[in-house]
Amino acid sequence: MSPSAGGLVVFLLSVQVIQSQDGWRVNYRQTDVCAAKGSTVYISCYYTYPPGIDPSDIKDRFWFTKEKDGEPVDLKTDSEYSGRVTYRCYSNSRSCYLTITDVRESDSAEYKFRFRTNKPGEKYTGSPGVTLCVTGFQVQVRRSDSTWLELTCHSSCVLSDRAEYVWYKNEKNIMTGSSLLVSSGSTDRYSCNLRGTWDNRSPAVYGPQRPSVSVSPSAEMLEGGSVNLTCSTDANPAANYTWYKEHEDSPRASGQIFTITNFTAEHSGNYYCEAQNEMGRSNSTLRLITSSGKGASNGWIAAFASTSAIFLVIIMILTVLFIRRKKSPPSSRPAERPENNAQIPPAEPCYATLSFSRNQEDLLLYSNVSPARPPRRKEEVEEVLYSRVNFESSGAASERRCEGAVDDSSALYSTVSKAPRE
């Protein structure tokens, strides 16, 4: 049997096993098969039967791993192997080959061959059968020295010494060999596979990426409170976490979460989380600050007092402006002194005759009298008050009194201007 087909390789232990009973016999070419996950597996056997049985009498030939009601279940009828199992059996050579494609870890089991004739009771099962172990690959890391790491492709079962491995760096094929040397602290991703298998690549190994650190509830802590520091990173193998405080050699805690209770001013400072695995290490820093409850309270009080003072100043300024506005007349009218004539009723021109007795000669006096008033924006027509004043001598007083309307040459005319009505 060829150990490879379609680019897939399976390595078999060539140990011959013969099972016989009264001429019934099954010969397996190997007792153990180690196969890489996703590869194709070939298992073969030779069988014999007692003389007198014609090859045409052989009715059924099949492989099985399970039994139901005491009877073997043909792999071709098992739903777990649907579409992945084929038989090639030859009557002349009395041989039969089992092929399983795309093997899975669940296919790991003991496989047996069974055949029977068309005569009742003539049947035989080759037992024990062939043990199949389906394995994946893991990259094992071993520190060679302080600078280099040795990577080895590992499987859960022993493959042939002829097994050849392919190494990948960041998904790219870089070399073929059983092991690989890389520098310590590398963040590149390394994986391996069995040559000839494409879908069975090992999980990649790589050092921790830069950790992400977070704090809850806040990085500014009140005295007496509690705080949780959390560190996380992406690494394979999984990283271990250690917490340090700056300028301190001894770690404060280990694990992904670091809890500080009864927080005080002494806890303030820079903390850093270090993530480490076999491939390397990386760290990130976080700063914590203490904020006392009293200081916070005083801060609120100071802020409230400042706001209140500003508010009071604004109110005082507005009050002063309002009072000044009330005392000042409208800007459209100039300041005026109160006028007494505001209550004087309107009057029409008035004529009056006044008589004065004197011994002197009659005098004629003309006088214009105008009361002072503030200027007006518009010219106003003045109402004129005419007064007639007669100055008489003592001798003629009686006569003039009788005449009434007789004018005297000695008269006083006075023009009085009255403020117009508003």
Image (tube, rainbow, N blue to C red):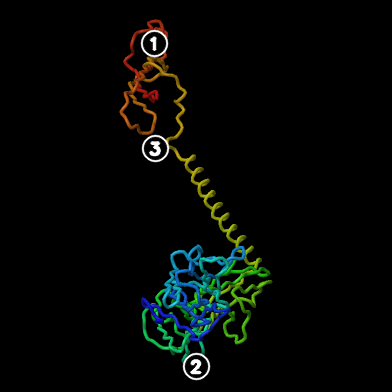
Residue 63: x and y in percent read 50, 71
Q: CA distance from mark 2 to mark 1?
A: 159 Å
In this rendering, the answer to whether 247 lies above or below 411 is: below
**Tag 1: amino acid:** Ala
Quick check: 396 left or right of 47?
Answer: left
Name the residue located 46 percent from the left edge and 32 percent from the top edge. Answer: 338
Quadrant of the rendered structure where residue 303 is? bottom right
Location of residue 305 (image quadrant) = bottom right
Give the labeled residue for mark 3.
334
Q: CA distance from mark 1 to mark 3?
A: 55 Å
- N-terminal of the two: label 2 or label 3? 2
Q: Is residue 410 left or right of residue 238?
A: left
**Residue 272 shows in this picture:** no
Q: Position of residue 22 (x, y in %)?
A: 57, 79
Quarter-wise, where is residue 166 in the image?
bottom left
Disc 3 marks which amino acid? Answer: Pro
Residue at (63% x, 69% y) in the render: 227
Between 75 and 202, the one lying in front of the other is: 75
N-terminal of the pair, mark 2 or mark 1, is 2
Q: Which residue is mark 2?
A: 144
Seen in the picture, residue 371 relative to 142 is either above or below; the reply is above
Give the residue number, with chain letter if any, for mark 1: 396
Quarter of the image for the C terminus: give it. Answer: top left
What SS does tag 3 mark?
A: loop
Is residue 404 at least partly visible in the picture? yes
